[in-house]
Image (cartoon, grey):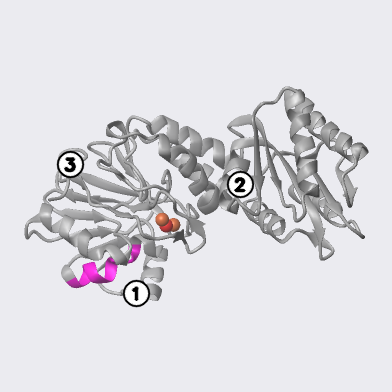
């Protein structure tokens, strides 16, 4: 009934797909769905690593039952308490009342607060190990990747890192969990969007975790979301390293603009013409009224330059631009080339605020920001073109 082929001998993927949820954390669109991964290790002792969202507990239990055939779970390893992974712990504890729950002091504080769980706790500290028989698990804390209690679990025999959210991605796991057996194309953009939105604020903690784990020989990464990484392991680690250093993947420009009556959009056309005329082909244009902020944020992680356009709105910037600015500031994105433009009817305000955003982020402001009053005439169109040109030249320099 279920795919019971092990990842390696006696280690099984028992995750589930969520194709129903519209919004992850109730605000991030999930057009490709999401998977909640859990892993079962069958040894002299049996360990389960993380659980799944409570909405899928029945199918989850059926998957576990199909493998265990009546054997009991000795240990539940809780790498992360966020309810997309810890949601089924209460039900699991009812099913396996003698199961020991393995976590750190912060894990247990959260388990008590969320689920009232205070018994059968096996506390581990940095570097502690737990023997299951042939296999041994070792635990390393990874605070703020993505919550403070997060830890990762290393299996010594097959060199598997159970990495919690790290290296996870949006997107269901279709037909098979192993990257080598499926098309992975759909995951790269979604992995970046997942990183940008969920983990993007925590670049320093991610770097700390990568440094801490760099000495471990790892052959397989089992994250809590998306495929099991083996063939693409070095690629996903490389991407996380780049993103957590806020280093762009490509030279190119993201333009994010809002426009009510088309004037800021006209300036957008001029800016894009300038960028392309300057020899930069990588230009991604987002109308903030049509594109969810999460996708724009992901592209800002991908590309070196960002230009924002906004009309003046209630003596400030356009509301959806304001939302984008807040999202960028929350993530503390570093080292971007930046410029801005905008329009107004009776009092200009947006461009001034957009210019001050360069100081807020400590970004380099490129070219001469353009502010247009009412209809766009030739002089402002040309100025916006020059702004795009200046950005292209700065990128190439
Ligand atoms: Fe997938 Fe931070 O939970």
Q: Quadrant of the C terminus?
A: top right
Asked if the residue at tag 3 contacts the one at tag 1, i.e. Cβ–Cβ closer than 8 Å, the answer is: no
- Residue 394, located in which quarter of the rendered image? top right
Do the residues under discs 1 and 2 have CB atoms within 8 angstroms?
no
Q: Is mark 3 within 8 Å of ligand 1?
A: no
Q: Name the residue: 32% across, 59% down.
A: 78
**Mark 1 or mark 2: which comes first in sequence?**
1
Residue 259's spot in the image, x, y percent? Answer: 74, 52
- Circle 3 or circle 2, nearest the eye: 2
* Disc 1, SS: helix
Residue 301 vertical placement versus 125 (above, below): above
Q: Is residue 104 visible?
A: no
Residue 360: % across, % down? 77, 51
Reading the image, the residue beneath label 1 is 115
Height in image: 255 above or below 31? Answer: above
Point 44% across, 31% down: residue? 235
Q: Is residue 228 left or right of residue 313?
A: left
**Mark 1 against mark 2, which lies toward the viewer?**
2
Real-space Cα separation, disc 1 to disc 3, in angstroms: 31 Å
Helix, strand or loop at disc 2? helix
């Amino acid at each position: 009934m279920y795919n019971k082929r092990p990842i390696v001998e006696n280690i099984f993927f028992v995750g589930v797909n969520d194709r129903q949820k519209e919004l992850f954390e109730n605000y991030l669109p999930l057009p490709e769905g999401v998977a909640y991964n859990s892993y079962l290790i069958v040894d002299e002792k049996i360990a389960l690593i993380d659980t799944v969202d409570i909405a899928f507990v029945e199918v989850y239990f059926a998957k576990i039952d199909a493998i265990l055939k009546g054997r009991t779970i000795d240990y539940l390893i809780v790498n992360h308490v966020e309810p997309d992974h810890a949601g089924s712990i209460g039900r699991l504890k009812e099913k396996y009342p003698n199961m020991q729950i393995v976590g750190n002091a912060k894990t247990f504080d959260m388990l008590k607060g969320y689920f009232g769980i205070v018994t059968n706790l096996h506390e581990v500290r940095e570097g502690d190990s737990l023997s299951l028989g042939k296999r041994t698990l070792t635990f390393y804390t990874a605070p703020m990747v993505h919550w403070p209690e997060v830890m990762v679990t290393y299996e010594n025999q097959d060199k598997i890192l159970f990495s919690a959210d790290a290296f996870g991605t949006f997107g269901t796991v279709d037909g098979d969990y192993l990257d080598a057996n499926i098309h992975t194309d759909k995951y790269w953009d979604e992995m970046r969007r997942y990183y940008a939105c969920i983990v993007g604020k925590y670049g320093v903690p991610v770097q700390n975790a990568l440094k801490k784990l760099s000495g471990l020989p790892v052959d397989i990464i089992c994250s809590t979301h998306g495929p099991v990484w083996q063939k693409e392991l070095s690629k996903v680690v490389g991407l996380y390293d780049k993103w957590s250093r806020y280093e762009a993947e490509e030279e190119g420009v993201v333009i994010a603009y809002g426009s009510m009556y088309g004037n800021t959009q006209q300036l957008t056309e001029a800016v894009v013409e300038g960028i392309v005329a300057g020899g930069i082909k990588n230009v991604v244009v987002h109308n903030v009224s049509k594109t969810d902020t999460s996708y724009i944020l992901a592209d800002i992680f991908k590309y070196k330059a960002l230009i924002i356009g906004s009309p003046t709105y209630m003596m400030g910037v356009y509301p959806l631009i304001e939302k984008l600015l807040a999202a960028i500031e929350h993530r503390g994105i570093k080292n971007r080339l930046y410029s801005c433009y905008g329009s107004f009817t009776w009092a200009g305000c947006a461009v001034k605020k957009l210019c001050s955003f360069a100081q807020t982020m400590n970004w380099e402001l490129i070219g001469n920001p353009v502010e247009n009053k009412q209809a766009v005439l030739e002089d402002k169109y040309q100025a916006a073109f020059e702004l795009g040109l200046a950005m292209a030249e700065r990128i190439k320099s």
